[in-house]
Image: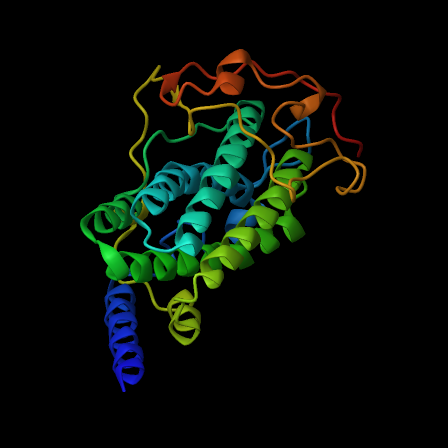
Amino acid sequence: MRSRYFVTGTSLLIGSVVVTLAVIVSPVMTGLTQESATNLSKMTNNQFGPLSGADKDFVVKVRLAGLWEYPAGKIGIQKGTTEQVKTAGKHLLDGHQLLDAISRDVAPQLGITLPNKPTPQQQGFLDTMNAKTGKDFDTYYANILRVTHGQIFSSIAKIRQTTKNSLVRRLAVQANNTVLDHITQMEKTGMVNFDSAVSQITTTPTEGPEFTTPPKPAPGEPTFIVGTSKPTPPPNSVSTADNGGEQSLDPNVVNGAGLGAGAASGAGGITTPPAVSSPPPAAP
């Protein structure tokens, strides 16, 4: 009898979280929705291949993901009440520290300015996590991160399919591996409501663009580094062997020369952008 009541109580808790998520979540929560033909056609020339508006947006959104999901990883480790939640938090730390190092390396080579702070919506997710405790925290954590990763998953595939730029293509491969891993970890918590997650991924947006637009960095503002130590590539990180012969995205050997000292040391705060090298242009 007690077991039945426990299951019912847990179901009600998950249901209440799902209702809350349905109100605040929209397809633009990650800032990356299905790109229009107009955006894809906004091409600029680059030595690594043509660069579209969608390509630029993608690099920025990879950066934004790290700006809020890396802190979310720390929160999960600190506040999670189960080992599965704490493990999911650890995966967020490892995955987004690596992706952030890569995005910071490729952005200047592509002429892209990266944000230093998450969007108001993303910051709201962190604030809500910090306010919750116990099982309520665990349930919110697993569901909000499952939904956000589920939203961007298909968008990564679209970028990988449409981009003509070699740096963006390789970043998309690593992002795909990382996001799939994070989706899997959230599901392993046993707290994800799958029916709700699927419906929320296709929900009509209810907030204006300012809710999902990050603050612009001030002129001359140094780049914020996600993480506090040298990133260690997870087992599913992109390597030359499993990336069709393209260059590795291990941050220690990006572009065959490695990241600058600032990026490799990872001060965990504001620093100057890493020095980057310029490999030969992509073949036509």
Of the 4 image quadrants, the one containing the C terminus is top right
Residue 211 % position (x, y): 26, 48
Residue 34 appears anywhere in the view: no
- The residue closer to the viewer here, 138 or 81, is 81
Q: Residue at x 53, y 45 (%)?
A: 54
Residue 132 % position (x, y): 21, 53
In this image, 247 relative to 258: left or right? right
Q: Hey, which quadrant is residue 195 in on the image? A: bottom left
Whether 140 is drawn above or below 245: the answer is: below
Q: How is the image coloured?
A: rainbow
Q: Residue at x 27, y 56 (%)?
A: 137
Residue 201 appears anywhere in the view: yes
In this image, 214 relative to 151: left or right? left
Name the residue at the left extreme: 131
Q: Residue at x 18, y 49 (%)?
A: 131
Whether 55 is drawn above or below 248: the answer is: below
Q: Residue at x 41, y 61 (%)?
A: 147
In this image, 74 relative to 128: left or right? right
- The residue closer to the viewer here, 46 or 147, is 147
Of the 4 image quadrants, the one containing the N terminus is bottom left
Q: Hey, which quadrant is residue 196 in on the image? A: bottom left
Whether 206 is drawn above or below 79: the answer is: below
Residue 275 % position (x, y): 55, 13
Name the residue at the bottom extreme: 1
How many tags in the picture?
0
Residue 205 % position (x, y): 32, 62
Whether 251 is drawn above or below 180: the answer is: above
- The residue closer to the viewer here, 179 or 56, is 179
